[in-house]
Image (cartoon, rainbow, N blue to C red):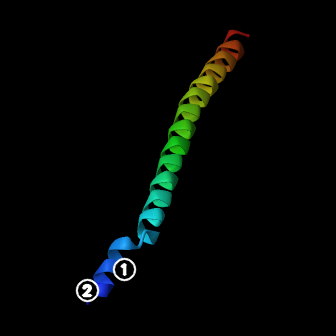
Amino acid sequence: MKGFICRFHRDEGGATAIEYGLICALIFLVIIAAVTAFAVRSNAMYDYISTTISAAISGS
């Protein structure tokens, strides 16, 4: 039993998997933030275009 505990304590495979998981989670959060920022800007752009076209059609 003591040998098992010593091997378990020295095993770093789980720590590596956790580190890769954390890196993937961080990358995912950055992607979500970028997509959200892009969506807000593009939504504002399309609102502006829609308003401008509506005003041009109404004014004619």
Tell me if 58 is positioned left or right of 40 in this view: right
> Split into 4 quadrants, where in the image is the N terminus?
bottom left
Single out the residue that lies furthest toward the right: 60
Q: Residue 8: horizontal and vertical position, in percent?
A: 35, 78
Q: Label 1 is placed on what type of residue?
A: Arg
Single out the residue that lies furthest toward the bottom: 1
User: Which residue appears at 42% of the width and 64% of the height?
Assistant: 15
Question: In the picture, residue 7 is in which quadrant?
Answer: bottom left
Mark 2 = which residue?
Answer: 2
Judging depth in this view, the residue of 21 and 60 nearest the camera is 21
User: Which residue appears at 50% of the width and 52% of the height?
Assistant: 23
What number is the disc on residue 7?
A: 1
Question: In the picture, residue 11 is in which quadrant?
Answer: bottom left
Residue 58 higher or lower than 10, as above or below: above
Judging depth in this view, the residue of 36 and 51 nearest the camera is 36
Instruction: Calculate the distance from the C-alpha at mark 1 to the C-alpha at mark 2.
Output: 9 Å
User: Which residue appears at 74% of the width and 10% of the height?
Assistant: 60
